[in-house]
Amino acid sequence: MAPMPFQFNTAFTLEVNKAGATTTLSASELWQGIKRGGRNPNDFADYVAACDVLSGGRKEFRRRLTLADGAVHTAKGAHLDQDVLIADDLHVRMALQLPFHSRGIGW
């Protein structure tokens, strides 16, 4: 019997401007960085070697990540296609496009 399809949703919270921090960010600066990471994740994640935007517009697009060394359960050079939605001042959603063939799912 084939496995049943399922969705896996995750969310997390990070503290910004912790007490004693030498650099602080405004909410606007933080949001600009989050939006930049949508199109340029390799600026923030060492395990991403490159990112190509395949289609879409400014706030909703499909991207292809090329993974570098250090990605979990994937080999250097593996590709991940993701749909990205940026809702201003609210959230960023990335959905992995299947099939993704690897020893597991790497993020």
Image: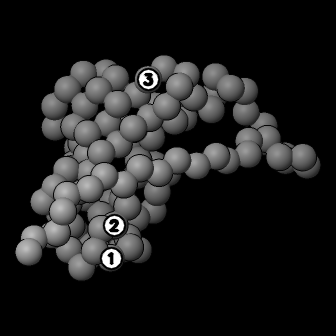
Mark carried by residue 73: 1
Is mark 1 in CB contact (under 8 Å) with mark 3? no
Residue at 16% across / 55% down in the picture? 98
Q: SS for tag 2?
A: loop
Dot 2 or dot 1, earlier in sequence: 1
Q: CA distance from mark 1 to mark 3?
A: 30 Å
Mark 3 lies on residue: 87
Residue 82 visible, this angle: yes
Quadrant for the N terminus, please: bottom left
Left of 66 or right of it: where is 71?
right
Instruction: Identify whether 87 is placed above or below 16.
Output: above
Instruction: Identify whether 101 is placed above or below 17.
Output: below
Is mark 2 in CB contact (under 8 Å) with mark 1? yes
What amino acid is at disc 2?
A: Gly
Few, some or many residues within 10 Å of mark 3 (<14, 14–19, 20+): few
Mark 2 lies on residue: 106
Left of 19 or right of it: where is 6?
left
Residue 53 visible, this angle: no
Quadrant for the C terminus, please: bottom left
Q: Position of residue 7 (x, y in %)?
A: 31, 52
Residue at 29% across / 26% down in the picture? 60
What amino acid is at disc 1?
A: His
Few, some or many residues within 10 Å of mark 1 (<14, 14–19, 20+): few
Instruction: Identify whether 58 is placed above or below 21.
Output: above
Residue at 91% across / 49% down in the picture? 20
